[in-house]
Each structure stands twice: as C-alpha cells, then as structure tokens.
Image: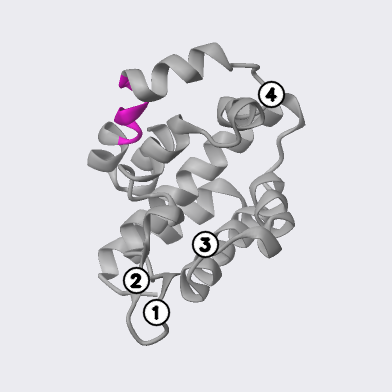
Amino acid sequence: MAHCFKAGIPLQGLRHDLSKYTPTEFLPGAKYYQGNRSPNEAEREEYGYSSAWLHHKGRNKHHFEYWTDYNPKVRMVEPVKMPPRYVIEMFCDRVAASKIYQGEKYTDSSALTYFVNGRDKRRINPETSDFLEMLLTMLSEKGEEETFKFIRDFIKSGKNY
C-alpha cells in the first residue's frame, strides 16, 4: 500500500490484495506461511497447484497472469497488454515483496534480479514486460525517489507505454 501511495495511485493501494483476507486465500496463507517465500509455493508442493494463487490471480488485476485471453486467430490463450496503472501497481507489489522476502539483503536491484531470472518461465505480454523491466531497471540504477517521481509524472501525462 505504501508504494502505491508513493506512486500516486492511493486508491489502488487501499484496495490492493484485499482478496487475501478471504478464506480461500487467508487459510492456506496461514497454514503454509514460512516467512522467506510465498505460502503458495508450499501449497503447490503438497497439491500440485495452489488454490489460493488461482483465486488471487483471478481477482487482482496487478498480476500479469490475470491478463490472458483467447486469441481466435491462433486459437490459444495468450497474454494481453496490461493497462499502465496495473503495471505500476505490479511494480509496487514486486518491490514490496522483494523487501519482505529478502529483509536486510534487499537492495534496489533485488526486484529486477528476480524479474530477469524468471524471464524464460514467464508468459507475459512483451510490451508489458518491457515497461515493467524499464521501471525495475530505473529503480536499480536511480533509486526509489527518482523512480516514483517518474511514475507519478507518467501517470499525470496520461500516456500509454
């Protein structure tokens, strides 16, 4: 929520991840909590899937996994371009998650490193991926203050990426 406020999207920050308080997500989150990684990973290890994650990604538009749709030309489900405000919320979420999971080891490069390391396993729209990577690179190179200023200015401009 704090990062969304810094980014200039306070209403999204207030609504961010409210689905985590539903029984479908909260109960597995409490059961599989370990503190150093997502509880969804442990639930997947036990069942082969995470019911909490399936519920979560289907209700929270800041996850790129939400943004898939059937393409009738190729007759397959494909990733689609995310609206900028949700990419910005995803950026905020990734930075916060990196801070939580890495604790004292966190640096402004942490979220970028995680993103780049998962590139080959991710099905995300290329334009969305490039925009998110640009924001994470800016954070890595210029820090939070300058990156959040850029984001606020970008939002005010009304531009798309």
Q: Are marks 1 and 2 in contact (CB under 8 Å)?
A: yes
- Mark earlier in primary sequence (4, 2): 4
Q: Is residue 100 magenta?
A: no
Q: Is residue 14 above or below residue 153?
A: above
For residue 70, the mark is 2
| Mark pair 1, 3: CA separation | 27 Å
| Mark pair 4, 3: CA separation | 24 Å
Q: Position of residue 64 (x, y in %)?
A: 44, 56
Q: Which residue is mark 1?
A: 75
- Mark earlier in primary sequence (1, 3): 1
Q: As drawn, which residue projects farthest toward the bottom?
A: 73
Q: Nearer the viewer, mark 4 or mark 3?
A: 4
**Extent of the magenta region:** 16-22
Horizontally, is 124 left or right of 12 in the view? right
For residue 36, the mark is 4
Q: Are marks 4 and 2 in contact (CB under 8 Å)?
A: no
User: Alpha-carbon neighbours of circle 1 within 10 Å: few (<14), some, or many (≥20)?
Assistant: few
Displayed quadrant of residue 74: bottom left
- Mark earlier in primary sequence (4, 1): 4
